[in-house]
Image (tube, rainbow, N blue to C red):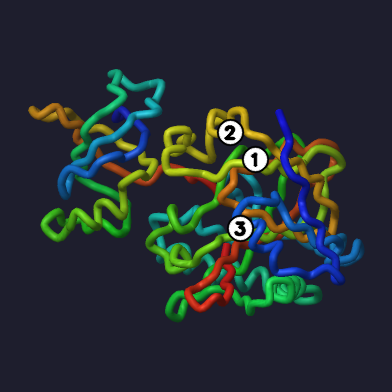
Amino acid sequence: MNDIIWGTATKILSNKSFEMDVTHQKEENSLTYSEKEIIEFTETDIMSIPADENLRTIQQIEQGLKDKFIKCEISSRNDQNYLICKVSHSGAGGY
Amino acid sequence: MPTHSIPKIITDSDLQTEYFHELSVGNIPAIIFPKILDKRECDDLSAKILSSKEISVGLGSTEKIGESLNSYISNKFEYFKKSKSSNGVLKKMFSYTDPREKMLAKISTSCGKKIQFAREKSRSYSRGIIRLHQPGTMIHIHRDNASFEASNFSVSELSGQLSATLHLQSAESGGTLCIFDKFWTKADEKHRKPVFGYSKKAIKKVSQTSISCNQGDLVLINPKKYHSVNAIKGKLTRITFGFFFGYDRHCNLFAWS
């Protein structure tokens, strides 16, 4: 099973990457992650972000991700030290 | 923990639109319209609800009949599909006494604005949600903010979101509504819990108002302030019916859940 981390997307870096403050890490994770990580996402459930990265704009990414609490399912870490993840909204802040 | 101001209890002879403004800006913790339904109406509805086969589990592990938008942030199609179905269930359940008529009328008369349930193109938003809180359960600290959390839905464009909750059956004891004197800010997202709500760190040293809600009372709160419900004690299930509402650019009110 993939490692999972949760946190807030703080800065959008490109149409497929962002900086994240990591606030929660799954107890069963095989590795430990830093308080700040750069995420490159391969897949997302966020409706306003097109699946095809060529069709995405930074504005769409900001609207869908910036300041949002999200869940990242980690598949690997690349040469740039970015975490390669599947990204989704996580839980709910209210009803 | 320190307490802050007392809720405003509004009777029919005391209808002033300024209370809505006070609630919106956070100067008062709640507006209470006492006994908008009588005991018999509440008991009849509660019995009907408790025997219903439409109860399912929702956010925060509460049992519910009806849909809430926050369960479908990433699945708009499913939200409207489920809302269409649950609106039918509620219509049937409320066929003799529809509490929404009195709730909407009270809100409209008190704030001097028309109110109706929201639609997006031809689709209806969920027209309220019944929540059943079983003895031993509680509702964790949370806030409600469609503008931030549901940005793909048209109700996110409404301003001044308020919450309306009708108390159909009170807990024997416990089940107190706590309003914390703090509005949510984006910076608080660091205190989020992965499944539901926020860590207590979000309301550390914040004063609170506790409201014991009585059967038949309609309670309006500003849901952008943190709130929670204490553990339900005794044998009775706490049963509420509620929805949110907010203003469009023409100052008309639209409701949803």
Could you tell which of marks 3 and 1 lies nearer the N-terminus? 3
Question: Where's the N terminus of chain B, which quadrant?
Answer: top right
Measured from the top left, where is residue A86 in percent x and y? 26, 41
Foreground residue among A32 and B184: B184
In the picture, residue B221 is in which quadrant? Answer: bottom right
Measuring 27% from the left and 51% from the top, which residue is drawn there? A62
Front disc: 2 or 3: 3
Q: Which amino acid does label 2 sit on?
A: Ile
The residue labelled by disc 2 is B203
Mark 3 chain:
B
Q: Is mark 2 on a helix, strand or loop?
A: helix
Q: Identify which residue, B89 or A87, lies in the foreground.
A: A87
Query: Which residue is disc 1 drawn over?
Result: B180
- Say whether residue B248 is left or right of residue B151: right
Question: What residue do we see at 85% from left, 62% from top?
Answer: B42
**Residue B94 visible in the picture:** no
Please state the horizontal and vertical placement of residue B252, each as a whole percent of the image.
Answer: 56, 77
Three-letter code for the amino acid on which mark 3 is drawn: Ser
Q: Which of marks 2 and 3 is nearer the N terminus?
A: 3
Determine the residue positioned at 80% across, 50% down: B213
Label 1 sits on a secondary structure element that is: strand
Mark sitting earlier along the chain (2/1): 1
Quarter of the figure that contains the C terminus of chain B:
bottom right
The residue closer to the viewer here, B43 or B32, is B32
Residue B203 on image: x %, y %: 58, 33
Identify the mark at residue B188; answer none if there is no mark.
none
In the picture, the disc for residue B24 is: 3
Q: Are marks 2 and 1 in contact (CB under 8 Å)?
A: yes
In the rendered view, does B94 fall on the left or right side of B64? Answer: right
